[in-house]
Amino acid sequence: MKYYTIHEMTEILGVTAQTLRNWDKSGKLKPHHTSPNGYRYYSEDDLNRLLNKPVNKQGKTVGYCHVSYPKQKKEKTQITASNIKKISKE
């Protein structure tokens, strides 16, 4: 099973590390485990649960994003394309 650091999760989800820490405190997204030095590690299952999406046949997370403005769509498309390239290399 693959584990993601807090930094990797921020890139995949497009949120800040502080947001992930707040989600941890509120119970929305708990890390799979925390190392002795306090680093949070999230599993693919954690990511899928958050996105409420099944894993596709290649074992990659599939998600979508709703945007309200054309500028947001362009930015999210660029970010998503970049993330897909990173995930595809794994």
Image (tube, rainbow, N blue to C red):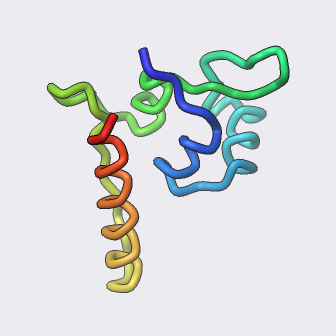
Q: Residue furthest front?
A: 89
Where does residue 68 sit, x and y in percent of width and height?
38, 77
- Image-quadrant location for residue 31: top right
Where does residue 50 sit, x and y in percent of width and height?
48, 35
> Residue placed at 36% from the left, 47% from the top?
86
In the figure, is residue 4 to the left or right of 21? Answer: left
Where does residue 29 sit, x and y in percent of width and height?
61, 32
**Closer to the camera in the image, 7 or 17:** 7
In the figure, is residue 6 to the left or right of 25? Answer: left
> Residue placed at 33% from the left, 75% from the top?
73
Where does residue 72 sit, x and y in percent of width and height?
40, 78
* Quarter of the image that includes the C terminus: top left
**Closer to the camera in the image, 57 or 35:** 35
**Closer to the camera in the image, 24 or 86:** 86
> Residue placed at 75% from the left, 28% from the top?
39
Total numbered labels: 0
> Residue placed at 30% from the left, 40% from the top?
89
* Quarter of the image that includes the N terminus: top left
Q: Is residue 42 above or below residue 51?
A: above
Q: Is residue 38 above or below residue 25?
A: above
- Image-quadrant location for residue 23: top right
Q: Residue furthest right?
A: 37
